[in-house]
């Protein structure tokens, strides 16, 4: 509990004690009024101050103004106990709200703890601490046991276990050794690591995560925008309504019915009407529900960039996947060399050198299979053809490495393969030289991810890939994906997504899940873009609306369920708050509801709505 919350709690307890004492004192008249002003000012001075400031700044109509007018009016009518009680219970409601926001902010603040304070650079055998912002790309830094990895990099020396729970939500440590990539924000648990940085601090994973979460609240959902507009018009309307209730009925009684105006009764009803009308439950609980949902998801490794995306995710009925690195591990291995007219080692050498400028997993697998030193000085005239392959000269010899489309472009006959996998066809010096079979493994939870999506109401799952048709169909069959389209260029993926967007009904959304640079246009075009954050490219993460920090596709369905729970709570609060308000406003206008019922309608509804909102924080682990 922070200092402000402790102060409010102390004032609440002090007011309760003072009210109990006053109930026992046999006083009346001005003495009673003066004594009741003490607990009233103790509990309500800050509300009165905010109301006065709002009037001074010409921003009159808010909950502070409503509370001030209603309680001052009740005291002027002699209803001292009710006036103090309204302010007391309002402050109790505010304390509940503050506590709930604090709980949801705690998830964010725990995430903020991943921000590293320094980086170690070794100089003359000693370590010097520097600001991570000062470390340039390519610098070797040292991370000791218990320290956070400050910047993304590659391990050059050492082996250790990393605690990645702050980033991915996974409690199982990850083992790393020399040659493996590591991301900032992880905690080094055991051995000393030396890393060569691959990014500047501002571009590292930890900086991007913090930026995404910090800015998430700026993107409001339709529900939040509705409540903002509702409160803007609702509050002045009820103020004018209360004024009419205080003035018009007495005038009608006096002028037309020749009865006593009974001003006191109608002013009391108008004040009750004001207390009931306060829109605190809506204004507080709706943003709090989204804030809690975003904070809870981020702690578990699912970063949602705004409440508008959380709301859209709850309506996802179409989920479209990339294949490589999304549903498969993206760790390719050469499984065979077939129909080769050159020695196997020579063919692998040509393929590895021709693909040496690419960072694609297939290119990396060719380089690993070759095993020799990659001398890029031997490679000239490199030309990459999107969705087809690479043209280059190796030692002055023209080499083409790619799929069947590239071979057809060159007018060459090529051999297909019965085995399932990705084929890299090779043409050397204008003649077909054979193909290399490369296999990719499915991710452990890929099949469960598709089953979970169908279970939670997704109508259609689709896979779009630039890979060969037989490979794509084999993977889709294993995963039970409804529809598959293969051998696509990046532009073709966009076209397929646009076709699917045209098929869906109003109110339904389409999510695309990808990880590569070529997926960025599709991630932007889809209703919801979901990127794989651990292996995904920077371009994909920037373009996406949701980022999965541990690349586990099973979390897509779990994130959808969390978003639906969040939206369900939002609508429960909207219907409950507005419903109770309308009933109590009618009862208050008719004189059936007194100030105590007004207190329940305002503070009681707010407390119940806030408690309902923070249920999102207790969602089972994704």
Image (cartoon, rainbow, N blue to C red):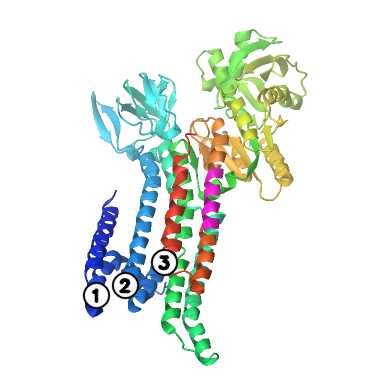
On the question of residue 332 being in view, the answer is yes
Q: Which residue is mark 2?
A: 80
> Disc 2 versus disc 1: distance between alpha carbons?
9 Å
Which numbered marker is on residue 63? 3
Label 2–label 3 contact, CB within 8 A: no
The mark that comes first in sequence, 2 or 1, is 1
Instruction: Give the total of numbered labels.
Output: 3
Which numbered marker is on residue 32? 1
Q: Residues within 10 Å of mark 2 (few under 14, many from 20)?
A: many
Q: Quadrant of residue 188?
A: top left
What secondary structure prevails in the magenta region? helix
Position above or below: 317 against 250: above
Q: Quadrant of residue 355?
A: top right
Where residue 262 appears, as percent x and y from the top left, is 44, 84
Nearer to me, 32 or 206: 32
Q: Answer with left or right where residue 158 lies relative to residue 37.
A: right
Q: Magenta stretch?
A: 564-576
Q: Residue at x 39, y 43 (%)?
A: 108
Label 2–label 1 contact, CB within 8 A: yes
Where residue 522 appears, as percent x and y from the top left, is 63, 41
């Amino acid at each position: 509990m922070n200092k402000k919350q402790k102060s409010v709690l102390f004032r609440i307890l002090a007011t309760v004690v003072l009210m109990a004492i006053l109930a026992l004192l046999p006083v009346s008249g001005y003495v009673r009024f003066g004594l009741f002003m003490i607990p009233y000012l103790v509990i309500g001075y800050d509300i009165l101050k905010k109301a006065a400031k709002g009037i001074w700044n010409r921003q009159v109509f808010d909950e502070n103004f409503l509370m001030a007018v209603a309680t001052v009016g009740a005291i002027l009518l002699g209803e001292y106990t009710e006036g103090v009680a309204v302010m007391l219970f309002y402050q109790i409601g505010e304390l509940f709200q503050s506590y709930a926001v604090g709980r949801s902010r705690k998830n964010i603040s725990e995430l903020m703890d991943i921000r590293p304070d320094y980086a170690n650079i070794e100089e003359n055998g000693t370590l010097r601490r520097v600001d991570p912002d000062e470390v340039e790309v390519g610098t070797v830094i040292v991370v000791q046991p218990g320290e956070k990895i400050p910047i993304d990099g590659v391990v050059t020396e050492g082996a250790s276990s990393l605690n990645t729970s702050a980033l991915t939500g996974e409690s199982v440590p990850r083992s790393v050794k020399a040659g493996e990539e590591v991301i900032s924000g992880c905690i080094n648990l055991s051995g000393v690591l030396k890393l060569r940085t691959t990014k500047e601090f501002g571009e590292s994973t930890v900086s991007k995560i913090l930026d995404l979460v910090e800015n998430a609240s700026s993107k409001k959902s339709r529900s939040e925008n509705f409540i903002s507009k509702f409160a803007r018009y609702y509050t002045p309307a009820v103020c004018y309504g209360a004024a009419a209730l205080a003035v018009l009925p007495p005038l009608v009684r006096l002028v037309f019915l020749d009865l006593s105006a009974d001003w006191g009764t109608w002013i009391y009803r108008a004040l009750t009407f004001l207390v009931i009308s306060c829109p605190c439950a809506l204004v507080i609980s709706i943003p709090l529900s989204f804030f809690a949902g975003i904070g809870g998801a981020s702690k578990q490794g699912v970063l949602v960039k705004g409440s508008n995306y959380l709301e859209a995710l709850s309506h996802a009925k179409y989920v479209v996947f990339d294949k490589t690195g999304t549903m498969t591990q993206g760790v390719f291995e050469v499984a065979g060399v077939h129909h080769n007219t050159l020695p196997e080692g020579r063919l692998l050498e040509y393929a590895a050198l021709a693909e040496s400028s690419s960072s694609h997993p297939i290119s990396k697998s060719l380089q690993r299979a070759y095993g020799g030193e990659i001398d890029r000085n031997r490679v000239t005239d490199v030309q990459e053809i999107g969705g087809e392959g690479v043209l280059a000269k190796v030692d002055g010899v023209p080499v083409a490495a790619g799929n069947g489309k590239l071979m057809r472009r060159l007018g060459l006959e090529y051999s297909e393969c019965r085995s399932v996998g990705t084929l890299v066809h090779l043409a050397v010096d204008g003649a077909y030289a054979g193909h290399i079979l490369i296999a990719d493994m499915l991710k452990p939870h890929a099949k469960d991810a598709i089953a979970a999506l169908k279970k939670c109401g997704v109508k259609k799952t689709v896979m779009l890939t630039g890979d060969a048709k037989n490979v794509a169909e084999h993977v889709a069959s294993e995963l039970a994906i409804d529809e598959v389209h293969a051998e696509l260029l990046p532009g073709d993926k966009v076209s397929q997504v646009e076709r699917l967007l045209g098929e869906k009904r109003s109110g339904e959304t389409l999510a695309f899940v990808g990880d590569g640079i070529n997926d960025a246009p599709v991630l932007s075009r889809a209703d919801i873009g979901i990127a794989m954050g651990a292996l995904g490219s920077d371009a994909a993460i920037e373009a996406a609306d949701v980022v999965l920090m541990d690349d586990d596709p099973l979390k897509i369905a779990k994130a959808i369920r969390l978003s639906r729970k969040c939206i369900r709570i939002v609508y429960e609060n909207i219907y409950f708050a507005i419903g109770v308000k309308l009933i109590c406003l009618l009862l208050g206008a008719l004189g059936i509801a007194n100030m105590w019922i007004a207190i329940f309608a305002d503070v009681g509804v707010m407390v119940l709505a806030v408690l309902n909102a923070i249920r999102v924080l207790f969602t089972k682990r994704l």
